[in-house]
């Protein structure tokens, strides 16, 4: 990887820089060719492609759009949607909305962290779960709510949240032993 | 006979899709030809999944439908024509008490029509306002009609809609833009999402009419990426409108061209602010800039731009169709029409409601919302999210209109209404919102960036029992400094949750500071766990669950908790089967 100064080198530690196939990005550049105001859309499509924003992809976006790398990095870190590291197989979104908060989401969150042994924003070592806080999932009448890979689970208690995770672990374990 | 199933995000989250699959399977097995209509959210989210059976006698609404109930409904009501009384919550003859007092203008079609069918929308009177505007009215007349209606911006600040439109129309230049702010970032609010999911064409129609009034030919809907279903339905609706020549060139042979695009927001609360939203639309970081110039003069790429939120646009077709006068019949002198609220928190009937302006908070919470969960004591209602404030019990008779709500220190906001009971700690709520604004501050203004952080530290200290009375003075001073020293609405209003709780619930702050007690028993650091010697039978379960071995006692004798060892994890309370452990 080429870096132009030492601060950029330090910055690169924030990223997972696994080799990805950058040629997959050509259709994205083509789609937005000649369109101004499309940086966010390009980043969104790139994340859709890889599941996160690899450093090499960000550098390529800077090169191809004629923007400074700092600007691309600035946008990628400004918005909550963008991730700089790969995620686990299951992404757990913990709703941090007001309705969830007054209905006990803190306790639920504590139980989930305990069960997975990670903090929000982290991924488990086995690469199975990523835990994230989100502003509001908009299912306030089901508070407290979490969403796992797009499916919402409502009216949670610390125990029921733990059980949901254990069930997924169990499902994965059975699948693995079937495959072996 | 028809089956109608609510599949808004809340309906799906509650299992609506599974119920639909069951009905589809049963219909197939029995060779019955009955139409299943899927709709958006009717607003009674706490009753989801909701199934309506429409037969020759009327409409019957079944609530909280489980898979086994679905089978029963199928066997009895659908096959034999026998409605199951015990599961029915309302009928067309006897509407649900939550719906009875509502006036539905914005939500007129939500939960009734299929949001993915433009024919349904047209059948319900849709796009007739657009036809009227394009064929019988000049742009000036459209603006005049909106002026007569008294419609004010539903995004929170309540700026007169006609005034914005007029300013954008009056701005020089042929290239103008129109934007819908659907970046609903306020935690605890889901009005915009429900309207787009339940009735996307009303937003599109409203935007086309506004574009015609202003003279814009391109529009954007800036919508949160976290709302995948809303985006999907909006995309479908835009394609359908194009096919029917309601979008595109020479709309309905009027000579007016308008193109509508979706831009996905990437998750930043500050993008609810107009200038930040425009920066984000331009592909930049969403950071606000100084106003003036206002977007109506210089907005998207420096061109005149009009921004309204979803609810504002969704009101427009109704106003043009029925006339501004008709709309102005609802509401108060200065706040006309209706307002949609997302009612949530410790409320019995949570959901999406629409009421005429001027109804009191008491009526909204008790008559529509059914009162407090488990009949606990009402403490406060939070309005306006992180920019708003908490309104106490004494002010429950405040009417819902812009001026009255502002006078309490809260704001109308976009419509989040979170009800809190005796178990909600007001210091914790202030801390919760500050934590949010602190994270969401874009960092441009020093007071907002650092001031909110210092305020949060003080609040954290207070909730951990480390606060002093002097802290409250510093806190209040910081509130006013952050208000004065911030460029945009985010910083200017961020102190509101703190100021209102300080104003109405100072005694709770003082309990945390002086007595080191949290009256609502929410602030963990201030709780002490104790064992009731009379209830404890000495089963030793709690002692086994304690991670720090703070609990001791002989078998079959009352146990005690050593307070210096206790880390307040709450394990013992969860383990005790005899309710012998309590908190103080």
Image: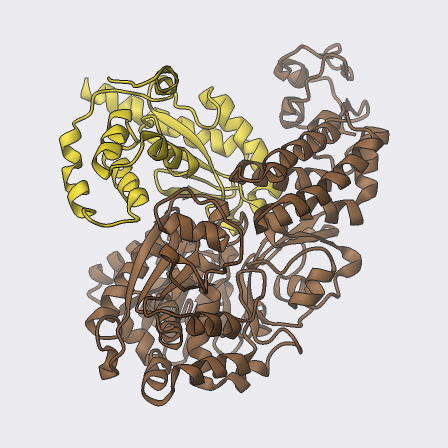
Chain colours: A yellow, B brown
Q: Is residue B259 left or right of residue B407?
A: left
Residue lying at 46% horizontally and 21% vertically, measured from the top left: A118
Q: Is residue B270 left or right of residue B137?
A: right
Residue lying at 56% horizontally and 37% vertically, measured from the top left: A105
Picture coordinates of residue B285, whole percent (x, y):
41, 42
| Image quadrant assignment for residue B525 | top right
Image quarter (top left, top right, bottom left or bottom right) of the C terminus of chain B: top right
Q: Residue most toward the front?
A: B172
| Image quadrant assignment for residue B50 | bottom left
Image quarter (top left, top right, bottom left or bottom right) of the N terminus of chain B: bottom left
| Image quadrant assignment for residue A101 | top right
- Decide: is B272 above or below B459: below
Q: Is residue B107 visible?
A: no
Picture coordinates of residue B201, whole percent (x, y):
34, 69
Looking at the picture, tell me which residue is in the foreground, A54 or B297: B297
Residue lying at 28% horizontally and 33% vertically, measured from the top left: A51
Q: Residue most toward the bottom?
A: B136
Q: Is residue A51 visible?
A: yes
Picture coordinates of residue B59, whole percent (x, y):
42, 74
Q: Is residue B33 left or right of residue B48?
A: left
Picture coordinates of residue B361, whole percent (x, y):
69, 64
């Amino acid at each position: 990887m080429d870096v132009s100064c030492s601060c950029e080198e330090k910055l690169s530690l924030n990223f997972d820089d696994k080799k990805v196939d950058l040629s997959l990005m050509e259709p994205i550049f083509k789609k937005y060719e000649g369109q101004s105001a499309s940086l966010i859309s390009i980043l969104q499509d790139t994340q859709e492609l890889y599941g996160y924003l690899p450093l090499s992809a960000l550098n390529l976006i800077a090169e191809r759009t004629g923007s400074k790398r700092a600007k691309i990095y600035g946008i990628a870190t400004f918005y909550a949607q963008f991730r700089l590291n790969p995620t686990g197989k299951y992404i757990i979104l913990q709703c941090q909305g007001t309705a969830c908060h007054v209905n006990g989401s803190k306790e639920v969150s504590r139980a989930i962290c305990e069960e997975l042994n990670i903090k929000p924003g982290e991924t488990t070592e086995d690469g199975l779960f990523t835990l994230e806080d989100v502003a509001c999932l908009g299912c306030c009448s089901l508070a407290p709510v979490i969403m796992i890979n797009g499916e919402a689970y409502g009216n949670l208690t610390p125990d029921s949240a733990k059980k949901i995770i254990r069930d997924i672990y169990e499902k994965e374990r059975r699948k693995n032993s079937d495959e072996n | 006979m028809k089956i109608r199933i609510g599949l808004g995000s809340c309906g799906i989250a509650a299992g609506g899709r599974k119920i639909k699959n069951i009905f589809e399977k049963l219909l197939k097995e029995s060779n019955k030809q009955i139409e299943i209509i899927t709709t958006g959210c009717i607003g009674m989210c706490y009753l989801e999944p909701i199934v309506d059976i429409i037969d020759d006698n009327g409409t019957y609404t079944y609530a909280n439908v489980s898979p086994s109930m679905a089978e029963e409904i199928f066997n009895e009501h659908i096959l034999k024509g026998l409605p199951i009384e015990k599961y029915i919550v309302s009928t067309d003859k006897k509407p649900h008490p939550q719906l009875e007092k509502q006036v539905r203008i914005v939500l007129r079609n939500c939960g009734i029509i299929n949001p993915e069918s433009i024919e349904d929308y047209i059948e319900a009177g849709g796009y007739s306002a657009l036809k009227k505007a394009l064929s019988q009215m000049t742009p000036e007349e459209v603006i005049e009609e909106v002026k007569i209606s008294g419609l004010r911006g539903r995004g929170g600040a309540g700026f007169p809609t006609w005034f914005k439109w007029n300013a954008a129309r009056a701005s020089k230049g042929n290239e103008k833009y129109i934007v819908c702010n659907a970046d609903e970032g306020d935690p605890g609010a889901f009005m915009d999402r429900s309207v787009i999911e339940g009735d996307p064409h009303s937003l599109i129609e409203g935007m086309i009419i506004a574009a015609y009034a202003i003279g814009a030919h391109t529009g954007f809907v800036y919508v949160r990426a976290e709302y995948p279903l809303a985006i999907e339905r909006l995309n479908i609706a835009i394609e359908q409108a194009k096919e029917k020549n309601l979008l595109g060139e020479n709309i309905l042979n009027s000579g007016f061209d308008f193109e509508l695009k979706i831009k996905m927001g990437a998750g930043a609360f500050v993008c609810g602010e107009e200038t930040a939203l425009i920066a984000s639309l331009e592909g930049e970081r969403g950071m606000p800039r100084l106003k003036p110039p206002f977007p109506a003069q210089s907005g998207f790429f420096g061109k005149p731009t009009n921004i309204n939120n979803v609810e504002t646009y969704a009101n427009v077709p109704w106003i043009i169709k029925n006339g501004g006068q008709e709309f102005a019949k609802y509401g108060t002198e200065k706040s006309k029409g209706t307002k949609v609220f997302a009612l949530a928190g410790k409320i019995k009937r949570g959901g999406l409601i629409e009421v005429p302006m001027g109804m009191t908070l008491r009526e909204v919470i008790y008559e529509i919302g059914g009162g407090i969960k488990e009949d606990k004591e009402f403490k406060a209602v939070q309005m306006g999210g992180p920019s708003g404030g908490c309104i106490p019990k004494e002010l429950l008779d405040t009417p819902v209109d812009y001026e009255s709500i502002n006078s309490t220190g809260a704001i109308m906001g976009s419509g989040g209404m979170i009800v809190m009971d005796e178990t909600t700690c007001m210091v914790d709520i202030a801390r919760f919102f500050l934590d949010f604004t602190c994270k969401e501050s874009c960092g441009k203004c020093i007071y907002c960036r650092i001031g909110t952080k210092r305020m949060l530290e003080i609040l954290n200290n207070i909730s951990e029992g480390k606060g002093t009375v002097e802290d409250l003075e510093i806190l209040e001073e910081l509130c006013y400094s952050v208000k004065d020293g911030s460029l945009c609405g985010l910083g200017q209003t961020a102190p509101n949750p703190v100021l209102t709780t300080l104003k109405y619930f100072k005694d709770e702050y003082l309990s945390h500071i002086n007595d080191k007690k949290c009256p609502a028993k929410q602030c963990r650091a201030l709780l002490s766990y104790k064992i009731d010697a009379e209830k404890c039978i000495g089963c030793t379960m709690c002692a086994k669950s304690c991670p720090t071995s703070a609990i001791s006692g002989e078998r079959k004798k009352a146990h005690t908790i050593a307070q210096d060892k206790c880390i307040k994890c709450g394990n013992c309370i969860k383990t005790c089967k005899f309710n012998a452990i309590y908190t103080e």
